[in-house]
Amino acid sequence: MLMQLSIAGISQGAIYALIALSLTVIYRSTTIVSFGHGDFVMAGAFLAYILVIGLGFAFLPAGLLAIAAMFAIGIVFSRGLIRPIRGGPHIGLALMSISFGFALRGIARLVWGREVLPMPRVFDVDPIFVGSIIITGDAIFTIGIVAVLLAAFFILLHLTDIGKMVQAVYQSERGARLIGIDVSRFHDFSWGTGAALGAVGGVLIAPVSFLHPDLGASFLIKGFAAMTLGGFGSLGGSVIGGLLLGLAEQYAGAYLNTALIDITAYLLIILVLLIRPRGLFGRKVVIKV
Amino acid sequence: MHTPAESRTAPRWIFWLLPILALAIPLATNPYTQFIINAMLIYTLVTLGFSVVIGNLGQLAFANTAFFGIGAYASAMAGNALGLPWLLTVPLAGLAGAAGGFLASAAALRGIRLYYLAIVTLAFGELMRWFYTHAGALTGGTDGLALDRGDIFGLQLNSDTVQFYIFLLLTTLLVAGTVNLLRSRLGRAIVAVRENEIATASLGIATSRIIVTAFVWSGFVVGIAGAMFALHTGRVFPESFGLTQLIINFAMVLVGGLGSVIGAVLGAVALTALPEYVRAFPGMEEIFFGVIVMVVLLVMPKGLASLLRRVSPIFHETHHRD
Amino acid sequence: MTSLLTVDHLGVHFSGLKALDDVSFSLEAGQVRAVIGPNGAGKTTLFNAISGYVRPTHGSVRLNGAEIAHSSPHSISARGLRRTFQNGGLFPALTVLENVMTGLHMQTEGNFIQILFGLRQARQAERDAAAKARRLLKLMKMDQMADIPASELSGGQQRIVEIIRTVASEPPLLLLDEPAVGLSPIARAQMMEIIKRLSGENGVGILLIEHAVELVMAAADRILVMAAGMRIAEGTPAEIRNDKTVLEAYLGHA
């Protein structure tokens, strides 16, 4: 029972980790929190759905195309909507990403109305039995993809020049400009990468859950919960936060009450921010008062 | 050339002119337009309360929709469970909203600011919505809670005209109170906290008290708007206080002008009186409000109020510079 | 007799670093005491520790004999110790008049209810505060600027308005953090005039951080020299001018 729950928790948590990671990538490189991110996830899932169901693509090329499209949308968003108000107050930046997400959600609703769309399962492989524990093909695939992506980002950010660039821009944009980094383009690229990573999450959930225009909102909150738990801005923290959230949801649902699954994330956010605002691995929160 | 402040701000009687003229509105409306105008009064308060926190105090708190829902449910629950007449539920709704405001300010005082505050207040709002859905008979779950409107002093409360006069009175009083607050030393201190919290404290001002004041007043105003909303629609649902409501609130605040009282009225009036086709197809509303916010942020970040200020100095409010 | 301000073995140590170590001095009403020293000497930490923005780990600070070392900034300020900020502490969106009125916040009557209902007491208190603020601005020849946003002032004007705002409530003790930095020679002279007037005519005790040597020498009654968080010398301007340790400290850090 516990093991079975843990597997479910980790496979769900891997998605949360991915979304938290995509939020962290944007936050670390632009110091903006992408409040419309849930809708990037949703848009990724819907694009994959259109390509598979509407245009008859196979799942893999459909997924890759959807991710590429979201990368482009992220860049367009950054260049067209964020760049002009970049120097303005944070409220404006937060609102810009929220309202862009809303527009995406509205478009999805305009096209699909209030239907809930099922997508055929992609990995119709037999589940693996380990003793009495069942591991589905979906779970293996999800966990595998997320693990590969996480590893790639860790190498990218900790062992390459790109990582140094991210750090330089994060610490001082002016300084980064002085050493010849095109900060604006770097920001565009980060938004693209963040949107694409969010879309990976969307593509992964598309075959295993029902699609509806509002699915992004809950993933946004879960991404936030994972980030908050792990420590805002910490890459590893957001991943561990995501996995812990996935586990916490499963355990709370099984041992306490199933209705708690929906609000584990909210409770976690409130508890962490009240008790230990910097999360598990974050640096001490510096509030400029 | 700068004229002294006294001659730049409107004399006090001008403020009362608008509600007095508005008394005649029901003479010229049909039930549908009256219903819409009543909604404008409600949204004026919702927008005003929001604007005080995100505009004047400058805190990125997203709990406004939560205050609205708390007020609406407090009114409906007090009516249903305690059998209170609606009018008596209004102060209760205000207090419940104020309590919500106090909770949000407690987070801000814990050093949870900026994005953290946005996230924690967002979570708070969603948590409230979950509560409405799961609290069984108390809140009526997803079916919502119907309101027994009844009457006061023999006047049927389900009449849109009766509602209008009550709403006009409440809205006028609360707007007047907010104007008084913002023009006072407290209003200056609220803006001072936004501009430089450390320097504000150096002037002997307990900044935490100022932050609590702004949040609690915001929650009170929006909570009362919630009670008005419950009466207006006759039934409260969890879905009325979700994220769509939040983006509508944002749009109204921004279109009117952050932190401006005149702007709150303008934003609420302009965006409540939406052409019906915006709501004709599912999703249109979200696209419409989403695009409005984006466009306003790009081309008119100070909102309609800034245009008015350019027209005449009588629209000048304290603490607003262009 | 108790001094206006008594700083006694004050220290701010954190994780092995001594940002401020064992500093003692006192300040009387009407006296100007300058704190000088190279960058990183702990001058601003000293200010922050006295005014409540940094919690001291050692020693005590007494205002008219009462301990304030662990009070919050606003309560210290309410007790009569007010300060300015090195990078400027004005509220850019408020007008000059509103900025000065904010300095009168604690002296302005009217509770929440009176304000909300616009009762006569509250409105009268507002008018009185505005009148007093205008009077102060006029005294400093800044009344022409009263109704423009603080953000539109020049750097020198901003510093003067900040001082007007800080002294509006007539505090007995003033901490000025580099009031002359970035000012033109004329504005500097004006600033020195203001400081002398406040201490001489109004009997305000002033603690002053300043790099402009000529201002310090002309305005200060006594000078405290700091380096590496510690006091290295103390005396009258004439004594400090000839002090060997001071010269070494400056040359050593130059």
Image (cartoon, grey):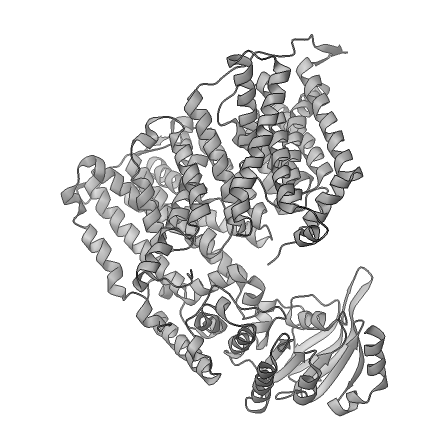
Q: Residue at x 62, y 57 (%)?
A: A288
Q: Which image quarter: residue C61?
A: bottom right
Mark yes or no: residue A251 visible.
Answer: no
Q: Nearer the viewer, residue C142 or A134?
A: C142
Question: Is A195 drawn above or below residue C103 in the view shown?
Answer: above
Residue A35, image x, y percentages: 54, 39
Residue at point 71%, 28% (across, down): A149
C181 or A224, which is in the foreground? C181
Left or right side of A21 for B174:
left
State left or right for residue A46 relative to residue C182. Answer: left
Q: Residue at x 24, y 47 (%)?
A: B166
Residue sitting at x 57%, y 27%: A69
Residue B294 place in picture, x, y as percent: 45, 41
Q: Total marks drawn?
A: 0
The N terminus of chain C sits in image quarter = bottom right
Of A92 and A229, the residue lying toward us: A92
Which picture quadrant has residue B52?
bottom left
Give percent across and percent down for residue C22.
Answer: 79, 74
The single residue placed furthest to the front in the displayed view is A180
| Residue B113 shown left or right of residue A99 in the figure | right
Residue nearer the viewer, B6 or A65: A65
Vertically, is A272 above or below C23?
Answer: above
Q: Quadrant of residue A140?
A: top right
**Percent coordinates x, y for residue B308 in the rendering:** 32, 56
